[in-house]
Image (spheres, coloured by chain):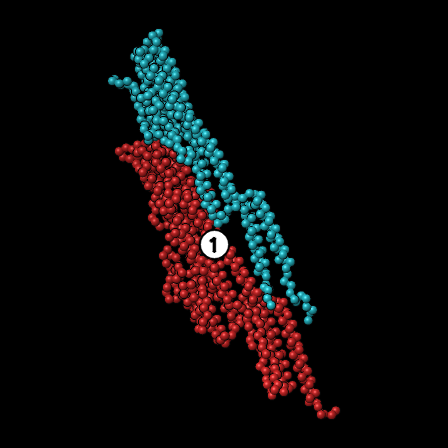
Amino acid sequence: MTRVNPDYSADLLSAIWKVDSQQQTALLQLASGKRVNQPSDDPAAASEMVQSLAVSADTDQYRQNISSVTSLLNTADSALSSVVTEVNQAITLGTEAATSTVSAAQREQLAQSVQGVLNNVLQLANTSFHGSYIFAGTAADTPPFVPVPATATSPASINYVGNAGPTAVNSVEVAAGNSVPINIPGSDLFQSSSGDILGSLQNIVTALQNNSPTDVGTATTALTSALQYLSARREFYGSTVSQLSSTDSYLQQEQVTLTSDQTNLVGIDVAQASMNVSQAQLAENSALAAAGKVLQTSLLSYLPPT
Amino acid sequence: MPGLTTSLWIASQALMVQQAAVNATSNNIANVNTPGYSREVVVLSEAAPSQDGGLTYGNGVNLDQFESVRDQVLNLRIQDATQQQAGAQAQLTALQQVQVTFSDATQGIGAGISGFLNSLSSLSQDPADTALRQGVLTAAGTLANSFHQAAAQLSGAQTSANLQVTQTVNQVNSLATQIAQLNAQIASVTPAGSDPGALGDQKAALVKQLSGLIGVTEIQNAQGDTLVTAQGSPLVVGNESYALSTQTGSGGMQQVVDSQGANITASITGGTLGGLIQARDQIIGGSNGLSAQLNSLAGDLATAFNSQNSQGFDLTPQTGGGYSPGGNIFVPPTGSNDAANFAVDPSLTTDGIAASADSTASGNNGNLASLIAIGDQKQATSGLTPTDTYANLVYQVGTAASQAQAEVTAGDASLQQLNDMQSTESGVSIDEETTNLMRYQQAYQAAARVVTTVDSMTQTLLSMGVTT
């Protein structure tokens, strides 16, 4: 005769605990919105999440960098725009002063006007942004252009005390593996051998003070070509801002994709989570009802009283 | 020829035997909910018959013994399953504690590493900015805190397991003593080869408890009962018990030593003790454990950042012109507890971040690019980038915990099934006992009836030849 396990209360309890545990898991997922609340829930997903969040953080940083660098570049471009306006004015004055119809006295006055332009351009060349001089290369803690007054033996001039060369240009990372230069050293913009704006302006002033129209003409021509050179170099700022804008659009899209990926990795659909909870509750109620129905009736219930 | 006296004697024997059977039934019913109780059955046999001339006649019933129905092989399987389950449970508990720090990926070391690297990136667009430099120091501090938290969590779990090792060894010794005492009692009270009854149940319960604590093998031989650990160290031999002891080993970890002085720590498998030791010495501790990996991550990071910072130039002016090379960003690692000790160098100021690659240009950010690039370089120990090293650590913790959980679940199911089988074999069934009660009561009534009848017949015999 095969004996049957007379005590199934342990099995019933175990079944109830199991659905209880499933219900708790479903509730936690619903409350947290996450399928993976600890690494053991899905070790691979938890691990990938760490890496994905790192990429997200980097993407956020790149966008911040773009924003800051764009401000810097716009500031520089705006300063150069003002320089162009000033220099054009000087070219007009110089062209006029080179003609023979202008008197010495007028040239004297024009010298002062052009000196005014030179002072303004000097100020613009020494523009600072957040405390750093943006045309100083990377020696950015002091104004890069220092005027040197005329002496008995030499005329007035302007010294560039910033730096130049490869270490004078900073680059900033704006996307993974993608760095952009963010400055042009002032010597390249205002005192280059391809175009010396400050030198030419100084020469016009000196020539006007010396009442030498020929020299004025020469210096004005040099100034005109220096302005062309500056304008060409100035392109860098506008085109970089434009490039950064499209990089930012791409990064914004990246952020959306990453967020979506992360939700897929560890998140749970609210609808799914709610359904899980309902199913678990149903299972629990069924288990409890079944346990309740299965009473430990024994033979004793059916025997007549002795 | 059997006479009335014989019949009377047989009936009176029967009364006693049925009474004894009711006793067994009563005992079973009383113990229906007693854990580990094996139901008793009365073993009855026919008494040896007598011969008289050509006649053979019976002599009634004998009560041979009260037998506890238990399956020793099943008991051994239950001990085995208990060992495995308890070991997995101990590991799971330790790993659940460890998991907590690694659970929120938006915080913790991964986020700390990102935060620090990104603070350097932020600085790169304006290297002289003091506020941005302070941001780097703050991010460095946050990274250090994340290492401390993780190290503290691992260390806490290890310490907890270590404490429990001592407590568990004490429990093992206590149980071994009790089992030895029971062995002595069983030997003195029960004749050899017969069933030890209730004492046997008690002993089985204690051995099962012991199995939950430490992996043991039970051997029964002529000398009695022997319990040994997996390595062969004796715990109980007959009525003698042999105590384990603990000694403080390297790093403050308790080592388990057997009664002969041998260190058996590494060979203990199974049971809570086995699980604790594995969690403590191999999963968390040990040369490839989580703590070691965390320390390597911390040490390699500190070394890499310090080295690169010293190749750049900070904002501290140097005599003779220019700026001086950078110093340490983080306290240099010592090779011991590098995660718990990971800290921003106390002498580091905002000026000390060596952003520049040019000793004459304080606004240059060339060295920052190299510092940031450390995030993409393979670490010396792990061969992975810092973030990937940490992600791998998270994976290991998750996998270990998930495996332990699976073992516990499987162990639970297995134990339940074995317990069901044991209950089928040895459990008290009220229905069965009720039926038996009725049988024994009827038999008692019938035997009593025999007594009454024989008595009446004797009276008839005695009153023969007496005229009234």
Disc 1: which residue? B404
Q: Is residue B100 among the parts visible in the rendering?
A: no
Q: Residue at x 52, y 43 (%)?
A: A267
Q: Is residue A43 positioned above or below B170 on the image?
A: above
**Residue A45 at x, y = what percent?**
48, 45
Three-letter code, disc 1: Ala
| In the displayed structure image, the side of residue A280 where residue A106 appears, left or right | left
- Quadrant of residue B452 in the image? bottom right
Q: Position of residue A2 (x, y in %)?
A: 59, 66
Chain B visual colour: red
Query: Along the line of sight, which residue is nearer the eye, B434 or B164?
Result: B434
Assign the N terminus of chain B to one quadrant of the image.
bottom right
Q: Nearer the viewer, residue A219 or B413?
A: B413
**For this rendering, which residue is in front, B323 or B420?**
B420
Q: Which chain is cyan?
A: A
Percent across and percent down for residue A123 are 37, 22
Picture residue at 55% right of the left edge, 63% below the top = B421
